[in-house]
Amino acid sequence: MLQALKNILGIGPKVDLGELIAKGAIIVDVRTPGEYAGGHIRGSINIPVDQIGQQTKKLKSKDQVIITCCASGMRSGSAKHILKAKGYTHVHNGGSWYNLKAYEK
């Protein structure tokens, strides 16, 4: 029961997002195109959360490392769960895109 609650909330072992990005993780920004145009991580892919289930063709492999981000971490958490349900195995919620800017290439 406790593990199920942790899974829903996205609580689990901490990952080093900077290391994942340095090793080539794909950053998927799930905000709207307008939000994305206002600022984003260089090299990220914009797939709005309400379209992510239909636009998985933009992602190469279900085994690649993917980090989702948005404005606060809520939509990126939803996107993570959608991708996991579609069979993507290495998906991490990066939270706010602005916090990920520290790791920008």
Image (cartoon, rainbow, N blue to C red):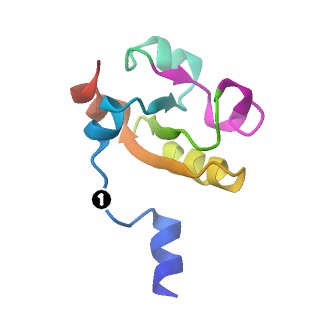
94 and 35: which one is in front? 94
Q: Is residue 56 magenta?
A: yes
Give above or below for 96 relative to 7: above
Q: Is residue 57 left or right of residue 9?
A: right
Q: Position of residue 15 (x, y in %)?
A: 31, 53
**Amino acid on which the number 1 mark rests in the picture:** Lys
Q: Is residue 85 magenta?
A: no
Q: Position of residue 6 (x, y in %)?
A: 45, 73
Q: Position of residue 65 (x, y in %)?
A: 49, 40
Give above or below for 73 relative to 25: below
Helix, strand or loop at label 1? It is: loop
Residue drawn at x 43%, y 33% as measured from the top left: 25
Q: Position of residue 96 (x, y in %)?
A: 36, 37
Residue range corresponding to the magenta coloring: 44-58
Picture quadrant of residue 70: top left
Residue at the right extreme, as displayed = 54
